[in-house]
């Protein structure tokens, strides 16, 4: 009997996405470290701080108390209450416990939201530059990405006017990441309010990635979730990773209307089920406890941003906007493309890694071809050494 092999092995949907560029850079850097290479790592998208003691203690206490079993899928009521209370205190939102879900990281909250809301052919407006996973997650769901170009001369700022022009009858959602990864752009309070009205009045979902919401250096942090009249068309996507230096804990959440949360919970029930039980207890300690660590982290990030900007801008030929939030700078390296046989930002970042031993992420991963992303949560000594190596490498390109 002859068995005919299937025509293809892998699904179309897996072919619509690529490996995360930041993860690929991290993997290549890990190989070099294993070979004993001394790298200066500007690639990692995470704070350099340790998780605060009171958060770690809460997790340890939960483990000691044998709080290690399954929980309800959307998270125990106490962690969801901590989420809604923190957001209400800081931003004036008005969510109930049934309008919150705790997830295995902010990325899962985003992924599941896209899966729940976006169908084949639905358009999603995505400002450029964008975080690396947005495009792929939308395409995986079968959605169509509508790229919204921003102006580097205006620090990549997203405006309501630009959003309105990009809306079509097929627009299902708009993604706003403010402050943004990679450029640190912040949507002004005025533009945010207009965008909320635009989305709500036209029945478009506004997906607010608030991963860096507490790292807004322009003044008081703002959230679209504070516009309670538009709750039916807003999904707040949050993460404890950057705010509380909890990247490896995988602690995220979503806030939305009850129907959206119910569907997120249904999808989560058939994938990851509940997030780690004792991480939920740690999250309660983070959200309900003292927020002094958040202010301390923010103050140091501002200092490191300014220090990094001074060093990067001192490299001849490199220009860089001033990020208004997050913890990255996004220098323009276009003057070096074409030199030394380098044809792209990706090639430049690759050679920077292997020849200068500096880790950076190429701009193509974020939708632009003339930049690299540099993460500055490192020591000033590392900033000194890394920018020195970068300067020597770029200066010697012919």
Image: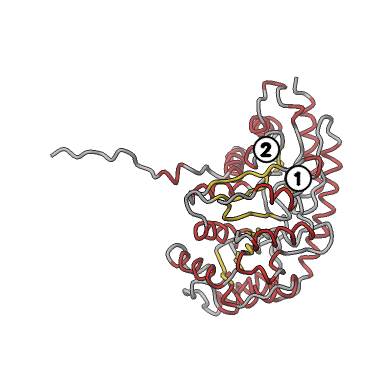
Q: Quadrant of the N terminus?
A: top left
Task: Give the residue number, with chain letter if any, for mark 2.
Answer: 368
Image location of residue 254, percent across then percent down: 60, 66
Task: Give the residue number, with chain letter if any, for mark 1.
Answer: 156
- The number of numbered discs placed on residues in the rendered structure image is 2
Disc 1 from disc 2: Cα separation = 11 Å
Q: Say which quarter of the image contains residue 195.
A: bottom right
Q: Quadrant of the C terminus?
A: top right
Image location of residue 178, percent across then percent down: 72, 55
The answer to whether 199 is drawn above or below residue 229 in the figure is above
Which of the two discs, 1 and 2, labels the residue nearer the N terminus? Answer: 1
Q: Say which quarter of the image contains residue 372.
A: top right
Image location of residue 74, percent across then percent down: 52, 72
The answer to whether 186 is drawn above or below residue 283 in the figure is above
At horizontal 51% and vertical 78% (from top left) the residue drawn is 66
Question: Is residue 220 at least partly visible in the picture?
Answer: yes
């Amino acid at each position: 009997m002859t068995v005919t092999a299937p025509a293809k092995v892998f699904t179309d949907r897996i072919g619509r996405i690529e490996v995360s560029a930041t993860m690929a850079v991290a993997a290549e850097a890990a190989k070099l470290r294993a070979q004993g290479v001394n790298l200066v790592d500007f690639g990692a998208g995470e704070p350099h701080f340790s998780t605060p003691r009171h958060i770690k203690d809460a997790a340890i206490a939960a483990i000691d108390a044998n709080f290690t079993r399954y929980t309800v899928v959307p998270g125990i009521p106490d962690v969801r209450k901590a989420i809604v209370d923190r957001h209400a205190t800081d931003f004036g939102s008005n969510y109930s416990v049934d309008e919150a879900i705790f997830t295995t990281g902010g990325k899962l909250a985003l992924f599941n939201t896209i899966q729940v809301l976006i169908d084949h052919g639905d358009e999603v407006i995505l400002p450029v530059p964008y975080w690396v996973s947005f495009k792929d997650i939308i395409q995986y769901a079968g959605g169509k990405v509508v790229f919204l170009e921003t102006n580097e001369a205006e620090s990549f700022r997203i405006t309501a006017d630009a959003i309105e022009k990009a809306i079509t009858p097929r627009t299902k959602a708009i993604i706003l990441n403010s402050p943004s990864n990679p450029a640190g752009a912040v949507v002004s309070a005025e533009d945010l309010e207009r965008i909320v009205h635009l989305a709500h009045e036209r029945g478009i979902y506004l997906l607010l990635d608030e991963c860096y919401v507490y790292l807004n250096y322009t003044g008081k942090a703002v959230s679209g979730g504070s516009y309670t009249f538009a709750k039916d068309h807003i999904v707040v996507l949050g993460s404890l990773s950057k705010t509380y230096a909890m990247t490896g804990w995988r602690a995220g959440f979503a806030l939305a209307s009850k129907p959206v949360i119910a569907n997120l919970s249904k999808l989560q029930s058939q994938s990851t089920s509940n997030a780690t039980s004792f991480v939920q207890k740690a999250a309660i300690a983070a959200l309900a406890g003292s927020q002094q660590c958040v202010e301390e982290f923010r103050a140091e990030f501002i200092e490191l941003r300014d220090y990094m900007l001074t060093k990067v801008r001192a490299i001849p030929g490199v220009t860089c906007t001033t990020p208004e939030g997050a913890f990255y700078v996004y220098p323009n390296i276009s003057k070096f493309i074409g030199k030394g046989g380098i044809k792209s930002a990706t090639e430049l970042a690759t050679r920077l890694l292997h020849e200068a031993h500096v880790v950076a992420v190429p701009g193509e991963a974020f939708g632009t071809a003339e930049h690299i992303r540099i993460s500055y949560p490192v020591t000033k000594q590392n900033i000194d050494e890394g920018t020195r190596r970068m300067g020597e490498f770029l200066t010697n390109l012919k």
